[in-house]
Image (cartoon, rainbow, N blue to C red):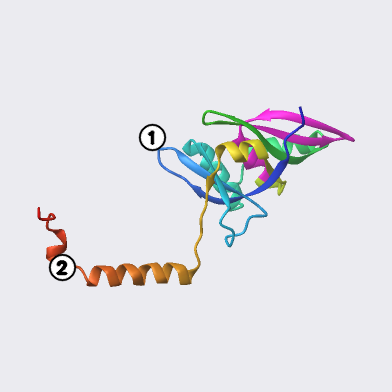
Amino acid sequence: MSKPTMVPVKIQTLIVAQAPHPSILVLVPSEDTPQHDDSRVVPIWMGTSEATQIGLAINQTKFKRPLTHDLMIDMISQLDASIIGVDIVRVEQQTFYAELSLHQQGRTIVVDARPSDAIGLAIREQAPIRISSDVLRQASFPYITRSKEEVNKELNDFHSFVTTLSPDDFLPPSDI
């Protein structure tokens, strides 16, 4: 069986919700642009604390003392290793599985990781994030964009329709 293609992704948005509601990290393929109708989004649901950690990484927030992800990066660095990237390799029901790849003294070390933790580390180290083409196909949704002109035309058409309505339009059809 051939290994699936890995597709580079970027973070489109992060929605941090308060418990008990889940937070959502939305990934999009890096090569997709808003002009294509075939763009896809991959929502990854996670807890508030995991989303907060990713938010801190995105905003490059620093604290006087290291947080867990900062500690991990310090440990990796002290072991003379570096983060190569994160691969989201499979999804089962709504659970995503990732691998964190490290480089140490000429060898690659692959570690099983939760996507939220691995992505938090990758953001801090500006390492690439990829998703398996199989996972992208299985867990993504279409992200359809329209131009401003299309949206304005649709709004104008709707406005025209609404302004021509009369109360009689809401009467049931009469039996003839």
Image x and y of residue 72, in percent: 68, 35
Helix, strand or loop at disc 1? loop
Q: Is 118 one of the magenta-colored residues?
A: yes
Residue type beneath disc 1? Pro
Q: CA distance from mark 2 to mark 1?
A: 46 Å
Residue type beneath disc 2? Ser
Q: Can you say whether 7 is above or below 33 in the image?
A: above
Helix, strand or loop at disc 2? loop
User: From this viewpoint, is residue 67 visible?
Assistant: no
Judge the density around disc 1: few (<14), some (14-19), many (≥20) Cα neighbours within 10 Å. Answer: few
Q: Start and end of the magenta stretch?
A: 97-122
Q: Quadrant of the C terminus?
A: bottom left
In the current view of this chain or complex, which residue is farthest to the front? 176
Q: Return the residue at label 2.
A: 166
Q: Quadrant of the N terminus?
A: top right
In the current view of this chain or complex, which residue is farthest to the right? 106
User: Which of marks 1 and 2 precedes in the sequence?
Assistant: 1
Q: Is 109 one of the magenta-colored residues?
A: yes
User: From this viewpoint, is residue 32 visible?
Assistant: yes
Q: Return the residue at label 1.
A: 20
Q: Nearer the viewer, mark 2 or mark 1?
A: 2
Image x and y of residue 66, in percent: 63, 40
